[in-house]
Amino acid sequence: MHKNKKLLEIFAVVFVMALVVYVFVNSSYWESSRDYFLKFFKTNSEVNIEVAKEVVSYDSEDAHEKAVIRAVEQVSPSVVSVIISKDLPVMEQCPYNPWGDLPQEFQQFFGGGMNFTQPCQKGTKKQEVGGGSGFVISEDGLILTNKHVVSDEKAEYTVLTNDGQKYIAKVLARDTVQDLAVLKISANGLIPVKLGDSDSLKLGQTAIAIGNALGEFRNTVSTGVISGLMRKITASDGMGAAEDLDGLIQTDAAINPGNSGGPLLNLKGEVIGINTAIVSGAQSVGFAIPINKAKNAIISVKKNGKIVTAYLGVRYIIINDQMAEKEKLSVKTGALIRGSQDGPAVVKDSPADKAGLQAEDIVLELNGVKVNETNTLSVLIQKYQVGDKVNLKILRDGKEINVTATLEERTS
């Protein structure tokens, strides 16, 4: 009996100590004391610092989950749905007389009295034909989305905000080079997103996609990682239109039809890309336009009311190992200026023409950045604005020369 009582007392003491430790570890006091313990251990040794971090660190999965939730809550009020509507014909079955002016007796012989109908149009009716996503970039109603979302000039567009408000949207600008467009709605006091730095992205970094999935499920959230950078694809809208896009972010965060134009976020809730395309039939292979490629377009719209795109005015082929060997070139990277059936190598009266560029010149660098399969000439030019001067290192007849070109506005 005495022995059992002793065991009971020991159990009670252990239980109380465990309870005290549990409450202490999960208390706000423990959270507020974290930095203090880290500083204390730091005064001893690097080994102790690692031990301290391991002892007092929060559960990493829980912290990651909270960061995702925080980012989504921060950005969701700025994400909008873009509804596409068109006047479509209303078709009905109308009475039809197949006999024309034949005598009544003849009609009776061949089945007269039967009711015949055929499809006919009874006016038009405005109907929803598709949807996409976008996000607020200014308090006074500027919305950034994909050009392919609002490509139909005969359609009407409605923006549905996160709080359920509907606005008629005007397509303010469509980018002639990138899959970008800017809408304008009559609203004030909107919450614009925070733009991140897509040039600093790392493979494996968390990516969060938000959008109007399938044109039906607003503010659908999916998460993944940055799977690749500087990707090049040919994107099709399924109706025959195709566009070459390069310098894209690849992510395995689910991007569905209707997500187009929505934001791709980092854990800080900053927009790092514009969700743009998926690979049909593939699993978790989506692409987004880096936000840094859209910043000039945003600045241009706010300044000029339209997207003004800088251009150089050359057609070129990017040089790689295979091409260098085939063409017997002395360099393995760069942009070989060469014409095609689509037009001359150097566009007449273009900035390139004025700078003296010639067919078969090889552009090696632009403002000190090497031109290659990743940094193509068009990717590098998109970082600049109309009126900017760029220095080009050219290889011509085996000799390197430097020329300066002043970028101008692309007109078509």
Image: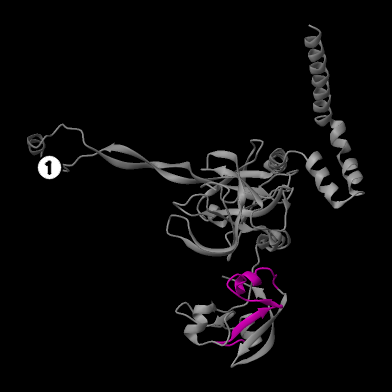
The quarter of the displayed image where residue 385 is located = bottom right
The tally of labels here is 1
Residue in front for this viewpoint, 256 or 178 = 256
| Residue 245 shown in magenta | no
Residue in front for this viewpoint, 55 or 12 = 12
Q: Is residue 341 above or below residue 36?
A: below
Residue pictured at 70% horizontal, 70% vertical:
384
Residue pictured at 69% horizontal, 86% vertical:
403
- Which residues are drawn in magenta? 357-386
Residue in front for this viewpoint, 34 or 130 = 34
Residue in front for this viewpoint, 14 or 359 = 14
- Crowding at dot 1, Cα within 10 Å, few <14 / some 14-19 / many 20+, comes out as few
The quarter of the displayed image where residue 405 is located = bottom right
Q: Name the residue under label 1.
A: 102
Q: Name the residue furthest top.
A: 1
Residue 199 on image: x %, y % = 69, 62
Could you say whether the residue bearing mark 1 is in a helix, strand or loop? loop
| Residue 373 shown in magenta | yes
Q: Quadrant of the N terminus?
A: top right
Q: Main secondary structure of the magenta part?
A: loop
Q: What residue type is labelled 1?
A: Leu
| Left or right relative to 210: residue 5 | right
